[in-house]
Image: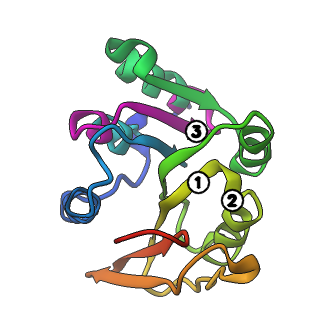
Amino acid sequence: MRKTCKEVRPTTGMVSGALFNILSAAGYMDGARFLDLFSGTGEIALSALKRGAYYVMAIESERDRARCISDRLAGFGEAAVCLRADVRRALPKLARDGAAFDVIFADPPYGMGWGKTLPPMIAEHSAILSPGGVFVLERAVRDETSDAESGDVFLPREDRPYGGTALSIYRKKGCGL
């Protein structure tokens, strides 16, 4: 059976609205370079473009979903791209290539330990997050998370719960959020 963009758990409207309200209020969206990890349906990537991001890169490992996202982003030309890649391989490659983003958003599968492993991965490859940038992790409230302050990369994490979902906000030092 082929998977489509509809066969994922997309970010709810309430959480998506909160995410972009937080980012917009802090001045992140106008002209932002936005990285959407575990892109799923591509809805967050599309919303970022519609809310003022200059450039969006979506990362999705599943072939059919990545194709669907690429189709959805096609109308934005070079301002948007979807890479079919595993996040564990994409992050070091982006760092080696000198890519930098103002906002990194991740909505990994819940209950699989990403809340503990992804923040340290971002910290390890912190060059991909612009000075003063922000990393936002969407997770289930029950999922464990990492403070990821090792290496003096991030300020203390801020958690904002929305029902059974939380946004964990990791601000790179120098951020005004």
| Disc 1 crowd, CA 10 A, few/some/many (<14, 14-19, 20+) | many
Q: What secondary structure is marked by label 2?
A: helix
How far separated are the C-alphas under marks 3 and 2? 20 Å
Q: Kindly identify which numbered label has been placed on residue 45.
A: none
Amino acid type at image mark 1: Leu
Residue tagged 3: 60
What residue do we see at 41% from left, 22% from top?
Answer: 79
Residue sitting nearer the eye, 156 or 108: 156
**Residue 57 highlighted magenta (yes or no):** yes
Residue sitting nearer the eye, 61 or 4: 61
Q: Answer above or below: position of 96 versus 2.
A: below
Residue tagged 2: 126
**Residue 44 highlighted magenta (yes or no):** no
Residue sitting nearer the eye, 140 or 36: 36
What residue do we see at 67% from left, 78% from top?
Answer: 116
Q: Answer above or below: position of 95 versus 65.
A: below
Q: Quadrant of residue 6?
A: top left
